[in-house]
Image (cartoon, helix red, strand yellow):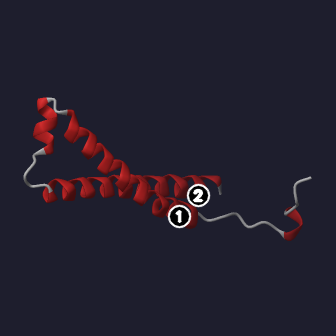
Amino acid sequence: MLSKFAFYGLSHVALSLAVGALAIAVGTFLFVRVTRGVDELAEIRKGNVAPALVLGAVMVVIALVAAPGLETALDGLLPLPELARDEVMAPS
């Protein structure tokens, strides 16, 4: 039983991690495509800090937008153990 929960837990964490990383990658790609006049990665390689700050801020905002959905996915997909009515007690 514990191995089943561990498998579900690890698979959902891995799936949420992959979806979150994919969301950040797609969002970053779209931001780079929208700002065609500026090559952010080339500017960052040259040592220009401003595009690095903007690109980092974009990544943080994408992560903040994606986080509640991923948290809901983690909370909702794991099977919860069934407790008998007698086993549920209020804290004393």
Callout 2, which amino acid?
Answer: Lys
Residue at 56% x, 67% y is 76
Residue 72 is tagged as 1
Residue at 7% x, 52% y is 37
Q: Which of marks 2 and 1 is nearer the N terminus?
A: 2
Residue furthest top in the image: 47
Q: Where is residue 40 in the image (x, y as percent from the top left)?
A: 15, 44
Determine whether, in the image, residue 14 is placed left or right of residue 46: right
How many numbered discs?
Answer: 2
Q: In which quarter of the image is the N terminus?
A: bottom right
Q: Where is residue 31 in the image (x, y as percent from the top left)?
A: 21, 56
Residue at 41% x, 59% y is 66
Q: Position of residue 88 (x, y in %)?
A: 85, 63
- The answer to which of 61 and 85 lies nearer the viewer is 61
- The answer to which of 10 and 53 lies nearer the viewer is 53
Residue furthest front in the image: 50
Q: Name the residue under label 2.
A: 4
Q: Position of residue 81 (x, y in %)?
A: 70, 63
Residue furthest left in the image: 37
